[in-house]
Image (cartoon, grey):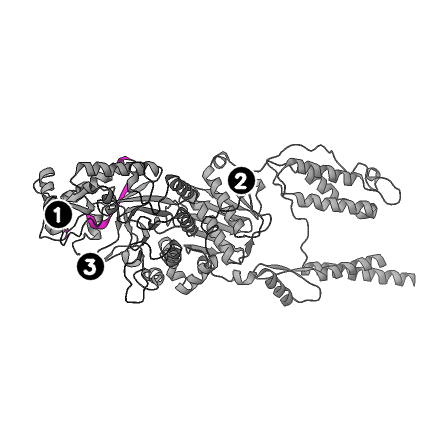
Amino acid sequence: MKRILVSALSALMILSTFTNVTYANGNKVDRVSGENEEVALVKEVENEKDLDTLNLTGDKLSSLVLPIVQSYEVSENAQNWTMDETTRFVIPKTEAYLNNSRLKEIVELVSAEFLEKQIPTTREIDKVYALDSQITSKDIVITLDKENPITEKSNSDEAYKIEINESGVKIVAASENSAMYALRTIQHLMITNNNKLVYGTIVDYPNVAERRVHVDMARKYISKDWIIQHIRQLSYFKMNTIQLHFSENLGFRIESDFDPAIVSQDGYLTKEEVREILTEAKKYGIKVIPSLDTPGHVEHILKVHPEFGQVDKNGNKSKVALDVTNPDAIDYIKGLYKEYMDLFEGCTDFHIGGDEYMEFDRPPFTTEYKEVLDNYAKENLGAEYTWKDTMANYINDIAAFVHEGGFKPRIWNDGIYYGENDNRENKQQIKMHDYIGIDFWSQMGWNPSIARLNTFIEKGHKDIYNVNASYFYYVLRPSKPDDGREQHSFDYLDQDVRIYNDWTPGQFQSNTIDDNSEVIKGTSLAIWCDKPDLVTEDVITEDISKELRSLASKAWNTSSNKIADINEFRENYKKLGNVAAFEKGTSLPEVQPVKELVELNYDELNKLIEKAEGLKAEDYTEESFGNLNKVLEEAKSLIGTVNSQEEINSMVNKLNDAINNLEGKGNGNSGENVPNSSEKPGISNKPGKGDSNNSGVLPQTGIESGPWGMIAIASIILGAFLIYRRSTKTIE
């Protein structure tokens, strides 16, 4: 009876030492003996820092990502999901996914970024193809759904959804690139939210399809490493396009086999370097748009070929404008376009310029060139045609040439439909090809004859891009402004604030349309190097950093400024820093490829574990049973953590041996003849092969203690005490 009493008291003491306490926030803590619940909770907060993150609203969590996500619906009684050493990036093990090389590439890329940024540690995250039965609650599972919209609010192929709960993290993406964006969102939250994801659902998509940076690498030589650096940075902020403007008045910056003489010798990209750029851009999901501007902005070419300059009424040749009436000049330009269409094969768009041919409202155009272009129009196009049609005819011709080469042509807005609202002269008769995309950059106050935005819409142009010069033009200027701005600057101080607070997709320069208009296909920040030697390319990087981040967020989520103010936004993106391998010339760490998990069979091991757990310590020597318990714990820890059947089979043999080597108490017998056992405890040491129906995860066998357990133990003690009293009285 004393043994019963002592055992019961011991159980009570142990139970009072470790009692699981569950709080309203869903967290459980092991209360240390002698401490109250408040102390235990403090220790939990100190160790996990959970409460601060759990108290964040959906908007607060949304703002921790750049760009700010569209919605983050936090679960009731939310908990935190954390990464640990067992976390894996998991792609479903199906034939379609196994053959999807692009998704594999993305998972390996982001894995390398996580490793460089030490998320969550310096250990590389495993990447596997796995069956449903092989997935654990610590995995990040990446799936694609290209057939059904991710959300009713958008049909974008860049949309994605992330579900975070007790089962783990599951991504559903509309495309491979959107899967990359989803992983970047997780990456950002890990950085800004103490390596934790709050239970809930993230639904995200862009408001503007194309989010671009234009780089004037023609006036100023821009290195391959700088371009790759910004390709990575754009991808980090979910921007998706870079435009390489490589021909200008002051330079021609890509190697040419067609005409080597026009290439700037003070700096240019080789074709091999361009191919490196294209490879990196493809890996990071960035579209590249080459830009060869004609018939204006060709001064550098005309220095080599003055014979191709536009002829005036006196027979003189322009030094800055291509002769759009000269078939030889046009054929030469088409030869250049052909060379670079071949180089940029695989790209979808080609910018052909069409802007700033001459200033049409003043001499020398009005006095020396207009007459020549008018006469050409009448002689070659028709009596009612004018110089406007001569220009339109050239742009249409080049656009068709590029389009036939497999590219969608783009132009700037100021060169066509000139004077459309001016009744004093004939309007342009030639209709531009409606497949031409329009970069609407300026409705210049000094020249009201430039066509308004609605003109392009009315003429049938369905692809218009907002490159509002009042917001997005960064210029290396010839002279310093008198309002405090540097020569290397945007039009206003704190332009990032103006972009973040005021700009929306429908706000074009001097023109406004609905933000949700279907014709708005993109927006762009533009770098222009009018005075190329003013600063280094690294200074440009620093100069545009704030504005780039503001545009990235507002183009993705137009309501960004309603979710977080500019100060919160700045603080959050400071925490995010730059993309992994941001420094020029660096590379990401090498990572292991995505591996295919073999189909594992735990049946034999599970049977042995069950057998071992049913054996009683009192039946065996302390040493032999202690060895069994050690091997048993090792076997249980193996479940769901191995990648080979050989490891499982080895553990089966090891556990089987531990059972067979048990020694019964007092008789020196082995486990073959133990009390209350008529058969050998162990089982066959020849486990079978894989079983696809096995989950590989053991059920939890422990019993969660709580107040009712305390009551039960107390009842046992009281009953034992009463029996003891009764037996004592009987003896007396």
Instruction: Determine the main secondary structure of the stretch shown in magenta.
Output: loop
Q: Out of 418 and 465, give the one closest to the viewer.
A: 418
Residue extending farthest to the right is: 732
In the picture of the structure, the residue carrying the numbered disc 3 is 445
The residue that mark 2 highlights is 594
Q: Residue flagged by tag 2: what amino acid is it? A: Val
Where on the picture, by quarter, is residue 286?
A: top left
Q: Secondary structure at mark 2?
A: loop
The residues tagged by marks 1 and 3 sit, at their Cα atoms, a distance apart of 24 Å
Rendered residue at 22%/52% (across/down):
453
Foreground pick, 181 / 623: 181
Query: Which residue reaches farthest left?
Result: 383
Looking at the rendering, the stretch of residues picked out in magenta corresponds to 404-431
Mark 1, other Cα within 10 Å: few <14 / some 14–19 / many ≥20: many
Q: Nearer the viewer, residue 619 or 219?
A: 219
Of mark 2 and mark 1, the one earlier in the sequence is 1
**Closer-to-camera residue (148/118):** 118
- Residues under numbered marks 1 and 3 in contact, where contact means CB atoms less than 8 Å apart: no
Disc 2 packing (10 Å; few <14; some 14–19; many ≥20):
some
Q: Which residue is mark 1?
A: 369
